[in-house]
Amino acid sequence: MDQYIRIPFFILSDTQLPDKAKLLYGVLLSNSNNEHEYAFGSNKYYGKLLNCSHKTISRLFKSLKKCGYIKTEYKKNNSRTTYVVNLKNEYPILTFDETLSLFSSKEST
């Protein structure tokens, strides 16, 4: 895992997601294999990392799935593979100035 996480602006600005779900997405993105865009990890692992219960992690996964940001696949042994949905083409990476202008335009409306 990287020494930092990145949270894309489209995740950060999604008002349907709880803040911890945004953090979890950043961790999943950081933890994912860039070539295949999947991440492994148990609810216990992510709960310890984000300082919350495994039940909370389950709810956060559900909210990310509901919004279409991740897909999960379960194996026979109850292990989970989480795929981070590739949204790079739909949501291009913005510069700092572009991000600030988006925030200021939302405040003026």
Image: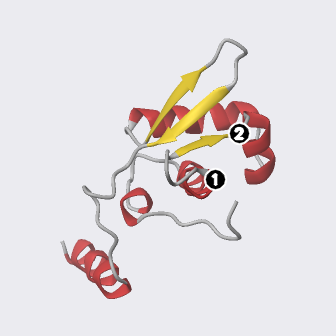
Residue at (28%, 82%) from the top-left corner?
Answer: 98
Q: Are marks 1 and 2 in contact (CB under 8 Å)?
A: yes
Position of 42 with respect to 104 (left or right) is right
Furthest residue toward top = 76
Residue 88 lies, with reference to residue 53, above or below; the image says below
Furthest residue toward front = 35
Quarter assignment of residue 58:
top right
Q: What residue would you read off at disc 2?
A: 41
Position of 107 with respect to 20 (left or right) is left
In the rendered structure, which amino acid carries the disc numbered 2? Gly
Q: Position of residue 33 (x, y in %)?
A: 57, 50
Residue at (59%, 50%) from the top-left corner?
Answer: 28
**If you read the primary sequence from the N terminus, does the residue marked by circle 1 or circle 2 appear first?**
1
Furthest residue toward bottom = 97
Q: What residue would you read off at disc 1?
A: 31
Q: Secondary structure at mark 2?
A: loop
| Colouring scheme, one of rainbow, by chain, secondary structure, one colour | secondary structure
Q: Nearer the viewer, residue 35 or 27?
A: 35
Position of 94 with respect to 35 (left or right) is left
Q: Secondary structure at mark 1?
A: helix
Quadrant, the C terminus? bottom left
Residue at (69%, 24%) from the top-left corner?
Answer: 79
